[in-house]
Each structure stands twice: as C-alpha cells, then as structure tokens.
Amino acid sequence: MINIQGIRYFFPLLFCLSCFFPGLGQPTLDPDLKKPVKYENRILRAEKTGEKKFTVPRRFFQNTYTHYNYAFNARNKLTQVLENAKSQHIDRYSELLSFYNYSLENTALQKTELDSVIYKVNAGVFLHDLRSDWMDNIYLMMGEAYYYRNTLDTAFMTFQYMNYAFSPKEEGGYDKIIASNANEDGNNLKVSTLENRNLIDRTFSAPPQ
C-alpha cells in the first residue's frame, strides 16, 4: 500500500537536494587539460598533425613507432590484467553465475598496471601523428583500461569519442548513419563497415577490434 504521507515529503526533499547540492559522480578527465611544466613551451607531435604531408615513409615510421612503442606494450598489459582477474574468479553454483569469468572488482585492484596502460596510450596519442593507423586501437585500449579500472564514466566518454571521431563520414564531414543506405554498397542491413586495407595496411597495422 502506498504511503501518501511519505510521498508528500519525498518530492520537496528531492527538489532541495537537486538545487542546493553540487552533482557528484566519478572523477573524470579534466576537459581543460594542462601540459606538464617541462612541456609547456614544446609543441607536441600530435599538435603538428596536418603541417606535413602524410607520405608513405612518414606513415610507415609513425605506424611502426606507435605500434611497437605503445600499442603493443599496452595490449600486453591489458591481457595480463584480464588473465590475473580470471585466475581469481570463482563460480559459486549456489548463486546466479556471472556472464564473464572475471569481475571489475578484481580488475580494479590492479590499478598500477591499468594506470601504466593509460599513461602509455596517452603518450602514444600526444607524441605521434594523429593520422596513424593505430589511433583507433590506442583509444580502444584507453577505454578498456578505464573500464577495467571500474571508472565507468570515463570509459563511456572514451568510447563515445571513438564513435564520433572514427565513424564513417559523408562528404562535408557529416556522420554516416549506421545500417543505412549511406554506407558501403547501399546495404541498409550492414552494421559494420568494410575497410580498404592494402598490402601496407595489412602488414603494419591491425584491423579495428
């Protein structure tokens, strides 16, 4: 039976809480990111994107550096974090079994390793040309690291940015609608998009995951 007296006091209380108390949530990235002091007067390579033509040699070197200096190590660390979490997982058959054989509580305990991944992928973004074929993989690993860290708000923001930055574009910069006639071959039943991956792409970069 509904308690009318309780409802009478609930809405004024809710109004006061929403108006007079600041919103609280998970700490996320500061939108106004500041460079470290030693880099204040230095223009990073990411800031130079577009100043030079993305020639074949430049693309080769940028892809190689970004892959083996940052993406490769970050992926190995994420894999190790997940393996450690899986090794600590226990299925209790007296309870409802979880869908995944790991929990975010276990992955979040490995904060040092995940912070190292976030540091590596951020360095991969700031110190390299943003036209590298590994940028989508770098941002994906950044989102994964925040997800495993159980910082879900920041993980959501990272994945949302990926959807915006790496989605197929129409002429003029407008987003193509997923599963619409604007996508390849006019197939409105196709959710994924095909990539034109030549020999160089297949050799030195990984397909989107």
Image: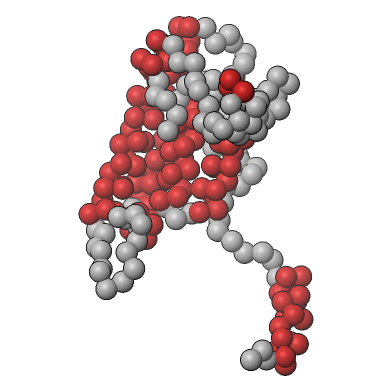
Q: Is residue 19 above or below residue 158?
A: below
Write down the quadrant of residue 179 in the picture. top right
Q: Is residue 185 left or right of residue 143?
A: right
Of residues 148 and 179, the one drawn nearer to the viewer in this rendering: 179
Residue at position x 25%, y 69% in the image: 93
Q: What colour scheme does the image use?
A: secondary structure
> Going 71% across and 86% down the picture, which residue do you hit?
7
x, y (%) of residue 3? 67, 91
Using the image as rendered, state which of residue 200 and residue 94 is in the foreground.
Answer: 94
Q: How many numbered tags mark residues here?
A: 0
Give the quadrant of residue 201.
top left
Instruction: Tell me if 54 is positioned left or right of 64 in this view.
Output: right
| Residue 37 makes an appearance in the image | no
Q: Quadrant of the C terminus?
A: top left
Q: Give the image location of residue 111, x and y in percent.
A: 37, 52
Instruction: Answer yes or no: is residue 107 visible.
Output: yes
Q: In x, y percent, where is residue 4?
A: 72, 91
Q: Residue at x 59, y 10 (%)?
A: 52
Please name whichever residue, 178 or 203, is drawn nearer the observer in this view of the structure. 178
Residue at the spot 58% in from the left edge and 20% down from the top edge: 185
For this view, does 197 lie left or right of residue 73?
right
- Does residue 189 appear to the left or right of 121 in the view shown? right
The one of 27 and 4 positioned closer to us in this rendering: 4
Please state, as top left, top right, bottom left or bottom right, where the N terminus lies in the image.
Answer: bottom right
Residue 166: image x %, image y %? 57, 29
